[in-house]
Amino acid sequence: MQSPIGFDPDYHQEAPERSALEALSGDTLLEFGTSWCGHCQRAAPCVEQALTAASLRHVKVEDGKGRRLGRSFGVKLWPTLILLRDGVEVGRIVRPTSTEDVMALLETP
């Protein structure tokens, strides 16, 4: 489901329950997308590089039609990265194009 700390290379088909994410303590980067999405493939190195300097949980969830978790967060475009702090959304970025974009999200107060 998730890597404990750092970059997770795979989108997971089995999504955690929203209640499980809301129960997490600390910071979690929640990423929605698919492995075949060109935008997701272009963003992956940016996310990976940004996470090398951060120590937080990274959860990659495969999104698509009929996937409830993405809909519950209002995801419409991939990749969408959502920063959760103690289970509450504190920031999001859609289709990041640089490591700096992702770093700015991770530095959300």
Image (cartoon, rainbow, N blue to C red):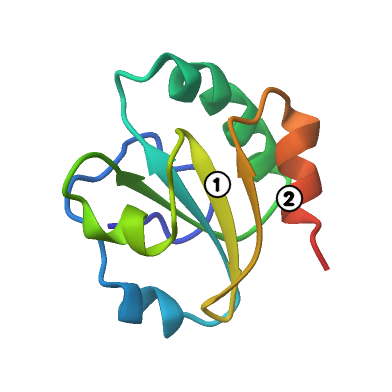
Name the amino acid type tagged 1: Leu
The answer to whether 65 appears left or right of 19 in the picture is left
Kindly identify the residue that appears in the image at 53 percent across and 82 percent down: 25
81 sits left or right of 14 in the view: right
Residue 11: image tag? none
Question: Residue at position x 29%, y 42% from top?
Answer: 63
Residue 81 got which mark? 1
Secondary structure at numbered mark 2 = helix
Question: Residue 86 falls in which quadrant of the image?
Answer: bottom right
- Along the polypeptide, which appears first: circle 1 or circle 2? 1
Q: Position of residue 35 (x, y in %)?
A: 31, 25
Q: Which residue appears at 53% of the width and 16% of the height? A: 42
Numbered disc total: 2
Please say if 83 is above or below 79.
below
Where in the figure is residue 39, as x and y percent of width and height? 49, 19
Q: In which quadrant will I find the N terminus? A: bottom left
Q: Position of residue 10 (x, y in %)?
A: 32, 36
Which amino acid is tagged 2?
Leu
What crowding class fits label 2: few (fewer than 14 Cα within 10 Å), some (14-19), or many (20 or more)? Answer: some
In what element is the residue under mark 1? strand
Mark number displayed over residue 105: 2
Q: Is residue 63 above or below residue 73?
A: above
Q: Position of residue 91 (x, y in %)?
A: 68, 59
Which residue is at 83% across, 68% downward?
A: 109
Is 1 left or right of 84, judged from the image as shown? left
- Label 1 crowd bin: few (<14), some (14–19), many (20+), radius 10 Å: many
Q: Quadrant of residue 56?
A: bottom right
Mark 2 and mark 1 in contact (Cβ < 8 Å)? yes
**From mark 1 to mark 2, how far is it between C-alphas?**
9 Å
**87 on left or right of 54:** left
